[in-house]
Amino acid sequence: MSTCLPCAMELADDAAVVFRDPLWACEVVPGFDVPGWFVLRVRRHAERLQGLDAQELATYARRLRDVVDAVGQVTGAPAVYQLTFGEANPHHHTLVAARGHDVPPEHRMGAILNLRAAHADTDAACALVPPVAAAYERLARRPQGRTA
Ligand SMILES: [Zn+2]
């Protein structure tokens, strides 16, 4: 049995799933279940950005942009961070974290991860899944190219 957390998310409850397509998935992840935080992960076990194949590389930015846009639209957060470390869990994934107006300066940027324990709330995090999923579905249908 795999001890890889991103691989284990294949078995996540539907309530935590923003979307899954053949290459990518986005979910609320246990331990990172702060409302407004989501993890975009490649579905097969591919380690770090360097482990992605050509098709995964070609689609990653588009998926990430659409998730970031969806999270920003639903939460109204002034910043939506994208964090990838490739260390504790080398399976390539990116934490997409809404940084709300209420987050004080000392907890912004990388320090936002310190909010994890105190702000984890599975129910509140999963309550954002349906609206983020709906926004993602709409945004992902945008034509390719410049859409801003
Ligand atoms: Zn994995």
Image: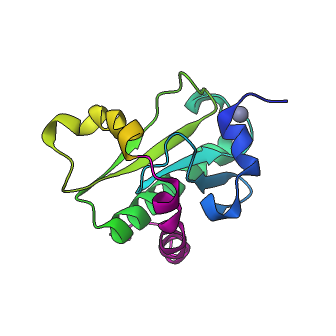
Please say if 43 is above or below 88: below
**Image point (53%, 21%), residue name:** 87
Q: Position of residue 145 (x, y in %)?
A: 45, 66
Task: Identify the image quadrant of the N terminus.
Answer: top right
**Image point (69%, 63%), residue name:** 14
Left or right position of 31 against 11: left
**Residue 117 in magenta stretch:** no
Residue 18 makes an appearance in the image = no
Outermost residue, right direction? 1
Left or right position of 127 against 146: right
Q: Between 49 and 132, which is closer to the camera in this rendering? A: 132
> By what rule are the colours in the image chosen?
rainbow
Q: Position of residue 120 (x, y in %)?
A: 44, 46
Q: Position of residue 97 (x, y in %)?
A: 38, 49
Left or right position of 79 against 71: left
Magenta stretch mostly in which secondary structure? helix
Outermost residue, left direction? 105
**Residue 131 in magenta stretch:** yes
Residue 115 makes an appearance in the image = yes
**Image point (57%, 44%), residue name:** 30
Task: Identify the image quadrant of the C terminus.
Answer: bottom left
Q: How many marks?
A: 0
Q: Between 64 and 35, which is closer to the camera in this rendering? A: 35
Q: Between 55 and 17, which is closer to the camera in this rendering? A: 17
Q: Quadrant of ligand 1?
A: top right
Which stretch is magenta?
Answer: 120-148
Q: Quadrant of residue 57?
A: top right
Please say if 21 is above or below 131: above
